[in-house]
Image (cartoon, rainbow, N blue to C red):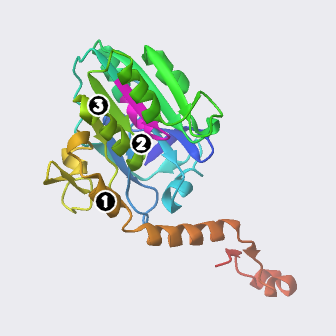
Amino acid sequence: MYKIVEATFLAADVKLLRLEAPEIARKRQAGQFVILRIHEHGERIPLTIADSDARAGTITIIVQGVGKTTKLLNTFEAGDAVPDVVGPLGRPSEIHYYGTVVVIGGGLGTAIAYPTARALKFAGNRVVSILGARTKSLVILEDEMRAISDEVHVTTDDGSYGEKGFVTDKLKALIAGGSPPQFVLAIGPIPMMRAVSEATRPHGIKTVVSLNPIMVDGTGMCGGCRVVVGGQTQFACVDGPEFDAHQVDFAILTARNAMYREAERRALEVFEREQHAEPHVCRLGQVHPAAAPSPISAP
């Protein structure tokens, strides 16, 4: 069991969980992830290790409640425990000295980008960070990114905070400013990563993205996380999750990630209906309390 020692909401449906996982904390490197299961019959979900503390023996994950399992995980509080956590998995980020690097985090992607941005800073790079979100309330880890960045820009789709527009608008402005970066890391929704890739391609700027395909076992055996990179099939769990953005087939990635969307939607509907259902009270208990069964949730 992996005890939760901290549980804090960073934004609506976005929660930071710090777990006791000493072996993972000692071995984890930037860019790696864990796969966890929250109950015996639950699905296995991959989550990036946003931070770790080897001395305290803890790892930090940040969860966005978008499906049944992540919404259920976000009901956990400090003192609760996660039964299964496996990791660290995946290839660590390749950290080199480039000069000036731009790190782009779209929404929850900021949590995934943070540890790599910090490692790039420690390697001597000048780090320029661009944080993007739909609206101000969804901007996360801004203080943490400012602490390890030389320059931070925030963009929101609705203009409620920072600059109105997309992360690619700011990236293009930086490139056109006369001092283009030597390296770009982009992590976030697939359309965003694809747009960043197309923005840097004409300039020949090395660009890396972290992919989030469907993943089950984390060992490359199930084949669920297949991605096409440079015309070759690779597995995000063992060959990634980070890949050369200019070599990724984003069309195939998008199609594969949508394969189970309808099943995921139905599962979420059932979960939310159960969460808001009134408990069923047996009428027999009103007459003979000793004979009443324990209350159950309505279907």
Q: Above or below — where is 10 with respect to 55?
A: below
Q: Residue at x 56, y 50 (%)?
A: 74
Q: Above or below — where is 160 with respect to 216?
A: above
- Whole-number angstrom distance, CA of label 3 to CA of label 1: 21 Å
* Disc 3 target residue: 29
- Whole-number angstrom distance, CA of label 1 to CA of label 2: 20 Å
Residue farthest to the left?
232
In percent of width and height, residue 214 lies at 33, 58
Magenta region: which residues? 102-115
* Image quadrant assignment for residue 186: top left
Report the front residue among 31 and 261: 261
Residue 59 visible in rendering: no
Q: Residue at x 15, y 48 (%)?
A: 230
In percent of width and height, residue 227 lies at 23, 54
- Whole-number angstrom distance, CA of label 2 to CA of label 3: 20 Å
**Circle 1/circle 2 CB separation < 8 Å:** no
Nearer the observer: mark 1 or 2; the answer is: 2
* Disc 2 target residue: 188
In the picture provided, is 194 more to the left or to the right than 189?
left
Q: Which amino acid type corresponds to the residue marked 1 in the rendered image?
A: Val
* Disc 1 target residue: 216
* Mark positioned earlier in the residue sequence (2 or 3): 3
* Mark positioned earlier in the residue sequence (3 or 1): 3
Report the front residue among 78 and 91: 91
Quadrant (top left/top right/bottom left/bottom right) for the C terminus: bottom right
Label 1: which secondary element:
loop
